[in-house]
Amino acid sequence: MKAWKYKSIMPKVLTEKHRLIEPKVIKDLVGRSPQDIGLALADSTYRKEISEIPLKQLSSLSLERAFVKSYMRTCMEIMHHSPNDIAFLLSSILMKFEISTVKTILRATEANLKIEEVSDLLVPAGSLNDVECRRILANSQTVNEVVSALSGLEYGPTLRESLEQYDRTGIFLFLEMSLDKFVCQRLWRSAVNLKGLDRKIGKTIIGLEVDAVNIRTLLRCKMLGIDKGQTKQNLLPVSDVFRESEFKAALESADIPSAIATLSKDAEFAFARDYRYVLDDILEEYRHSGSLPQLELALERSLLRVSLRMLKRYTPFFNIGLILTFLTLKGVEIRNLVACARGKEGRLSTKRIHELLIFP
């Protein structure tokens, strides 16, 4: 790792990190309407994207689109000043948003929704601009036709492979899990492609994110009673902590708590402290609530804590840690803002909205 790689990146990242919204400000937005939230953020880093929305059209959906567009713009600005290995990592992070758009198109097609009903849900990203999204929706009557329309893109082969599972079982989750698997494989390649301390930090943070997807997949399938063989097909064999046999043992566990406990013991044996912290957190949450959504929320909180610990563990300058931590914090900030806007529209109590927020 060479420090000079970061001389053009760090000023931008540090500036954007200081522009993150204070937790107190976000808490003050709880219970306010999307219109009020939009006005309150008029001088924030989201100003450009929010200003493009007419006041009467401010809603949780239009705000979410604005927040995501702001994130993508910031990430691309950092990419512009990055060397090739870091740019590839950032492009892999951005790929998450294109994959999210693909999932929306697939869900809308399966539900036979009209283009007008879907347009507010789409955030065009990467290869899928607004025109392309509308073309695919207009010309596809079935999920198979959507997959065919996307066959020429980087994730096309992955979708085609998962289509057989979907056609045989009718379980839409298989398509989504295959797309998650594609993104994770790309992220892992980008982390392994780094050098020196960057590689160590990247593999730790990205590796934990990849394994979090594996854990989420395993627990979702277990709760839904999905066949173990089909679940195994959708797990990523790239972990530095868990071997295939250990995931198999978790699959064979009697229930969700015992599956989590099995992985926690494996993490302890591998001296993977960060993994143990995460697994112990979500085990405690599941025992308390018995809810998979709450478990996934606890998983997100734990991943944020690990990311921040990595930043403290290594110097924040001249390595990939600051960039990854900033992007994690930015993603969490957007998630919190969306929770505030959706909570008001969904008439959730202020107490419930506060429970959905994640803070460092």
Image (cartoon, helix red, strand yellow):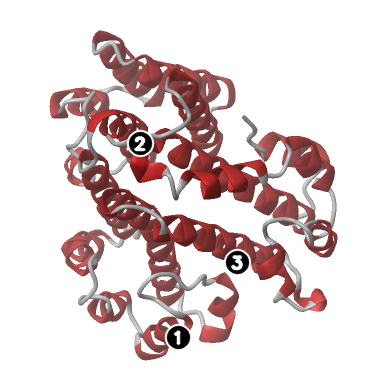
Residue designated by label 3? 65
Q: Is residue 195 visible?
A: yes
User: Badge 1 is on which residue?
Assistant: 134
Q: Counting residues from the N terminus, which is met first, the one under dot 2 or under dot 1? A: 2
> Hey, what amino acid is under mark 3?
Arg
Q: Nearer the N terminus, badge 2 or badge 3?
A: 2
Q: Amino acid at mark 1?
A: Arg
Labels 3 and 1: the sequence-earlier one:
3
- Please state the horizontal and vertical placement of residue 15, each as a whole percent of the image: 61, 46
**Label 2, label 1: how far apart the Cα atoms are:** 44 Å
Between the C-alphas of marks 2 and 3, the distance is: 35 Å
Residue at numbered disc 2: 3
The image shows residue 6 at horizontal and vertical percentages of 40, 43
Residue 131: give x, y in percent of width and height: 44, 87
Residue at left offset 56%, top offset 61%: 68
Labels 3, 1: front one: 3
Q: Residue at x 32, y 75 (%)?
A: 143
Which quarter of the rendering shows the N terminus?
top left
- Secondary structure beneath dot 3 equals helix
> Which image quadrant is residue 219 in?
top left
User: Which three-letter amino acid code belongs to the residue tagged 2?
Assistant: Ala
Residue sitting at x 37%, y 33%: 205
| CA neighbours of label 2 inside 10 A, class few (<14), some (14 to 19), many (20+) | few
Looking at the image, which is closer to me, 187 or 146?
Answer: 187
